[in-house]
Image: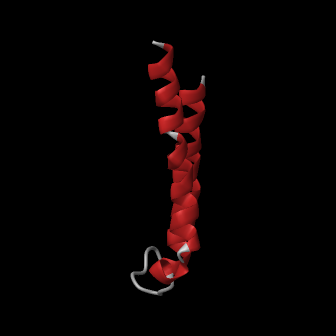
Amino acid sequence: METSNQARRTRVWPLLLAPYIALLWLPFYNDAQPVLFGFPFFYWYQFLWVPLTSVLLYIVYRSQR
């Protein structure tokens, strides 16, 4: 039982890599289109990752408890 709990804990850590990869790969989101609420894609894509990163951090935190 302890090994499955440990495996579950280590399995969620790669989720924290998603924001880094998504935001460091600048050619992917270096564009003005599409526009959302008057914001170019370049800005709203970065703003979108703020709550997404919070959710991912919460998932990892809960799995460690």
> In which quadrant will I find the N terminus?
top left
User: Residue 58 sits in which quadrant?
Assistant: top right
User: Residue 17 sits in which quadrant?
Assistant: bottom right
Q: Residue furthest left?
A: 34
- Up/down of 31 relative to 1, above or below: below
Residue drawn at the location 51% of the way across and 71% of the way down: 44
Viewer-nearest residue: 47 or 21: 21
* Residue 40 visible to the viewer: no
Residue drawn at the location 56% of the way across and 69% of the way down: 23
- Up/down of 36 relative to 61, above or below: below
Residue 21 percent coordinates (x, y): 53, 65
Q: How many labels does the image show?
A: 0
Viewer-nearest residue: 63 or 3: 3
Q: Residue furthest bottom?
A: 32
* Residue 3 visible to the viewer: yes
In this picture the colour scheme is: secondary structure
**Horizontally, is 61 left or right of 36 in the view?**
right
Residue 2 percent coordinates (x, y): 51, 15
> In which quadrant will I find the C terminus?
top right
Q: Residue furthest top?
A: 1
Residue drawn at the location 53% of the way across and 29% of the way down: 63
Residue drawn at the location 52% of the way across and 24% of the way down: 6
